[in-house]
Amino acid sequence: MSGSLGHCLVRVRQATVCLVFLVLLSPADAWAQGTSVLTLLSTDGRKLEIGDEVRGALSASDFVTSGDSYVEAWALEGRPGQEVSIDLISDDFDSYLYVVGPGLAETLTDDDSGGACHARINFTILDRGVFHVVASSTAWRQTGTYRLRVSEEPGPVAERSCGGVDGSDLTGLPTDGRRLTWLEPARGRLSGAEATIRDGQPVQAWALQALAGETATIRLESDDFDAYLFVYGPGMSEAMTDDDSGGGLNAELTVLFLETGTYTIGASALSAGSTGSYSLTVSEPIDMNDLSTGGRMLMRGSNARGMLTAADPVIDGKPVQAWAFEARAGDFVTVELMSDDFDSYLFIVGPGLAEPLSNDDGGEGLNSRLDVSFPADGLYRVVASSLGGATGVFTLSLR
């Protein structure tokens, strides 16, 4: 029987338990007027006391909500006036926590207040009685182990976002003599014998020495697997990660190093079990103001045709091609980038512009358009690019 029935909690592989006139809603809106259906969940002898830290597990034998998430209930008793902090901690699923009981006008719920993907609820016990503390997850039928911690004062919050990686997991990996040097490509290979991190991703660690204030672009390329890049080191609260910003299935991160020291660069693959060769490079970020125009010039009132190719420079996962345009202060033009081959992305850089002007779909369809009043005399660069890293033919128009 489906777990989406509004008046039922379904126990997988066991009999369905129907709770007439009570509705268990999805995790985002999990209470009904009056008595919550969660109070009718059996705790099966699972008890909590303030000061406890207990272990449990969500599994296919648990009840399922209408949102198709497993739930497991614990009983908690306390005295009126007590401050209670409850943490639901799991490395196996994105935690979702419910508390229902005497004196509470509605079900208390939380997703990520404990940091990372951990849930936390703080409340004051107003009436005597038994509270139901219900462990669950945010996603469809996630399973795995968890911890419930009950205390009178909130503990520390995990210093990473949900889905983020604890930097200590990276710094604890051996580098085995693997050191990166600026501008010198390094080659490695995932063999399948590496340590894994988050969802079984294989990872091989490299050391990079950097100075405070330096900025580097770190690029991971592979023809054998979907590259995934980690960076962590001094002054960083959590690891930086990237999947496909290097174009195609390559990964790329631009990092401002906050402190002098050794940083850990994790060469990884998106999928567990991936193997193959890869290359890592560390270089200074490309500044669009320094892009070569290769003799390409744009004239007011004209159209120019070009082609993005795999040989063009890549910035933030986008191939870029620069065209020169001579302007005077106060000149006003409309620039359009049009292509039938890719979702166009347009940039303009030059004197008097502190940041690049950019546009995605300001033109018709997936074409880009910018209306520009130039702030100074000088040579500007009109940069043609694509949103998804695709290549192909394009037209630039100035009028």
Image (cartoon, helix red, strand yellow):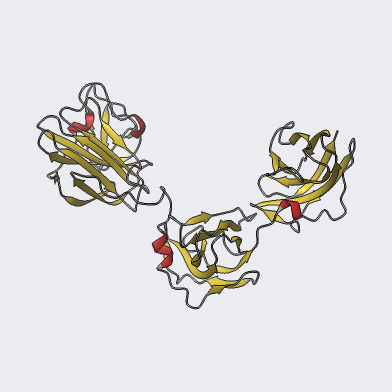
Quarter of the image with the C terminus in it:
top right
Left or right: residue 356 compared with residue 46: right
Horizontally, residue 206 falls left or right of residue 103, namely right
Query: Residue 293: x and y, percent?
Result: 82, 53
For the point 71% across and 36% down, the residue is 366
The image shows residue 36 at horizontal and vertical percentages of 22, 27
Location of residue 159 with respect to 259 vertically, above or below = above
- Residue at left 75%, top 35%? 370
Q: Nearer the viewer, residue 70 or 292?
A: 292
> Is residue 11 visible to the viewer in this orientation of the structure?
no
Q: Position of residue 292 (x, y in %)?
A: 80, 56
Q: How many marks?
A: 0
Q: Nearer the viewer, residue 141 or 157?
A: 157
Answer yes or no: is residue 36 visible. yes
User: x, y percentage for residue 101?
Assistant: 17, 31
Q: Residue furthest bottom?
A: 177
Q: Nearer the viewer, residue 114 or 306?
A: 114
Quadrant into which the N terminus falls: top left
In the image, residue 295 above or below residue 337:
below
At 54% from the left edge and 54% from the top edge, which residue is drawn?
242
Q: Residue 378 lies in what quarter of the image? A: top right
Q: Quadrant of residue 29?
A: top left
353 displayed left or right of 269: right
